[in-house]
């Protein structure tokens, strides 16, 4: 559970959330009442940084950070937000993540622009606003590059920090130190400088990598007047939060077959199951039962049995996806469920391999099929071993530190120069090759080709279902062996290169 911190209205945003009512929502709660009821499910006793002078607020936030034993979720107290967005923010895998909105890029219609390259642009004190906040942040594709203030210039600002900030507990000491240092520099800041903006400004200059995410299909807005509260309540009331929650229950990094032939409808099965009280573990058992039934059909060796087995193994995979989607949609996670899912995915594959081999033998073919079956089982076992061991090793690898900059430095040019040096160091040799291959993924054809090449579980089950239904076990095992070997070589070479480049 996170440590929730509610920030009083920042100096530049004189809002009184206690009195602002969300008239379009049931019960017409005030902004403060609604937000407090939302965060109580995350933290029964949220910390509050009361509105006051900026230095006092910063020191209070530093005290909260020093006492923190859990991850921090920092929110302005005049926030109108979906529950699902709060949930996603506090479950963020990144050690630091901020909710942002970027300025729309100007339409060029293919014409040349007179805008100079970012590397030649001079730092500026941003004077534009977006959603009532100053555009004084420069963000890249995945993280905040630099932040400015009324005193600190930033190179080509393009982003607004909306307010919510999630911070891993390991960064709490850095947050505390940063807030205390900022409290001594409040004479440099202007009345329009937002508290969250200042906190992220300090964290970035201390070398903390602050990731970014947008609202996507969810709602967040800070309100300062009753008119803004009325507008926000009407807009949030008109959005389908449940549909957004259901869509977010589907993993975004699945393979081609899973994305286009399973997840398009499996999410609706997951919602149906969750609303009827089915647990993820129960859905896992259904998947296991379908896998065993598929193996039994394959073991007959008859064409009808092979077709039935192909259909059953497909739906075994569908329910294998549904159990995770139920867990994410209903927010029911457990160690047992994760262990069952990982273990019995392998069990289903291996029992199906056995069923295919038995069916091949009972129809009068030779026993040599067992050699192919054992070769496929061995190959798949080695691939899983490499997957888990590489994952464990990657999690132990410490992140490469980012450059730092004194809080008193008037602009971000020294920081950008250090980042440029770092980028040049990473653009040569193996790192350059990996970076080029990563960039190629922006093309859909390359992206999906790479996804299919690694032969994930969806493609494996599809290959089993199709080849078994139309051909025989020998063709199935040869397909798995050839494609699996190519996938193993591709994955192993990529991991060796990444290991050498780290």
Image: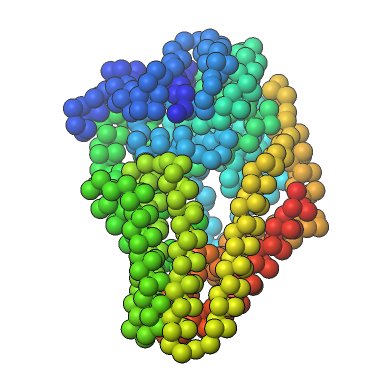
Q: Quadrant of the N terminus?
A: top left
Considering only vertical position in the picture, is 292 above or below 250?
below
In this view of the protein, which residue sits in the foreground, 170 or 473? 473
In this rendering, would 305 be left or right of 104? left
In this view of the protein, which residue sits in the foreground, 491 or 248? 491
Can residue 304 be seen at all in this image of the molecule?
Answer: yes
The picture places residue 108, in percent across and down from the top left corner, at 54, 57
Residue extending farthest to the bottom is 364
Q: What residue lies at 33% left-to-right and 43% top-to-bottom?
A: 330
Asked which quadrant contains residue 226, the reply is top left
Can residue 127 be seen at all in this image of the molecule?
Answer: no
Considering only vertical position in the picture, is 62 above or below 293?
above
The picture places residue 462, in percent across and down from the top left corner, at 45, 72
The picture places residue 251, in percent across and down from the top left corner, at 45, 53
Considering only vertical position in the picture, is 311 above or below 252?
below
In this view of the protein, which residue sits in the foreground, 60 or 288? 288
Asked which quadrant contains residue 304, the reply is bottom left
Q: What residue lies at 39% left-to-right and 46% top-to-bottom?
A: 328
Residue extending farthest to the left is 27
Q: What residue lies at 60% left-to-right and 18% top-to-bottom?
A: 176
Q: What residue lies at 39% left-to-right and 18% top-to-bottom?
A: 45
In this rendering, would 253 be left or right of 303? right
In this rendering, would 169 be left or right of 272? right
């Amino acid at each position: 559970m996170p440590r929730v911190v509610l920030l009083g209205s920042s100096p530049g945003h004189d809002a009184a959330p206690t009195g602002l009512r969300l008239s379009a929502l049931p019960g017409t709660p005030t902004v403060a009442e609604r937000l407090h009821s939302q965060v109580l499910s995350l933290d029964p006793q949220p910390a509050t940084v009361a509105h006051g002078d900026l230095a006092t607020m910063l020191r209070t936030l530093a005290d909260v950070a020093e006492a923190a034993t859990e991850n921090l979720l920092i929110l302005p107290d005049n926030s109108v937000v979906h529950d699902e967005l709060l949930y996603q923010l506090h479950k963020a895998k990144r050690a630091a993540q901020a909710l942002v909105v970027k300025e729309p890029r100007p339409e060029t219609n293919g014409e040349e622009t007179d805008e100079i390259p970012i590397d030649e642009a001079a730092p500026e004190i941003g004077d534009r606003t977006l959603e009532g906040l100053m555009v004084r942040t420069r963000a890249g594709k995945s993280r905040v590059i630099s932040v400015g203030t009324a005193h600190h210039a930033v190179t080509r600002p393009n982003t607004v920090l909306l307010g919510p900030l999630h911070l891993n507990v390991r960064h709490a000491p850095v947050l505390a130190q940063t807030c205390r240092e900022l409290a001594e520099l409040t004479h440099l800041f202007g009345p329009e400088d937002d508290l969250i903006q200042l906190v992220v400004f300090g964290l970035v200059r201390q070398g903390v990598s602050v990731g970014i995410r947008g609202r996507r299909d969810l709602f967040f807005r800070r309100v300062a007047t009753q008119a803004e509260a009325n507008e926000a309540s009407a807009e949030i009331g008109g959005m389908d939060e449940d549909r957004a929650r259901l869509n977010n229950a589907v993993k975004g990094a699945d393979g081609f077959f899973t994305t286009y032939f399973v997840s398009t409808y499996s999410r609706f099965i997951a919602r149906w199951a969750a609303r009827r009280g089915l647990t993820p573990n129960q859905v896992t058992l259904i998947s296991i039962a379908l896998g065993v039934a598929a193996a039994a059909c394959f073991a007959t060796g008859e064409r009808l049995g092979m077709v039935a087995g192909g259909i059953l193994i497909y739906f075994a995979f569908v329910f294998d996806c549904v159990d995770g989607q139920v867990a994410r949609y209903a927010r029911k996670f457990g160690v047992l469920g994760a262990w069952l899912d990982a273990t019995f995915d392998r069990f289903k594959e291996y029992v199906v391999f056995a069923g295919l081999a038995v069916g091949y033998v009972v129809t009068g073919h030779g026993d040599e099929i067992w050699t192919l079956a054992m070769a496929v089982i061995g190959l798949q076992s080695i691939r899983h071993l490499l997957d888990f061991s590489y994952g464990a090793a990657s999690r132990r690898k410490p992140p490469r530190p980012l450059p730092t900059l004194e809080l008193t430095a008037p602009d971000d040019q020294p920081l950008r120069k250090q980042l440029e040096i770092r980028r040049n160091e990473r653009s040569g040799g193996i790192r350059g090759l990996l970076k080029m291959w990563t960039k190629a993924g922006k093309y859909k054809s390359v992206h999906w080709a790479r996804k299919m090449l690694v032969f994930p579980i969806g493609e494996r089950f599809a290959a089993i279902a199709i080849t078994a239904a139309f051909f025989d076990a020998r063709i199935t095992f040869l397909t798995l062996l050839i494609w699996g070997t190519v996938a193993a070589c591709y994955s192993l070479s990529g991991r060796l290169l990444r290991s050498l480049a780290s």
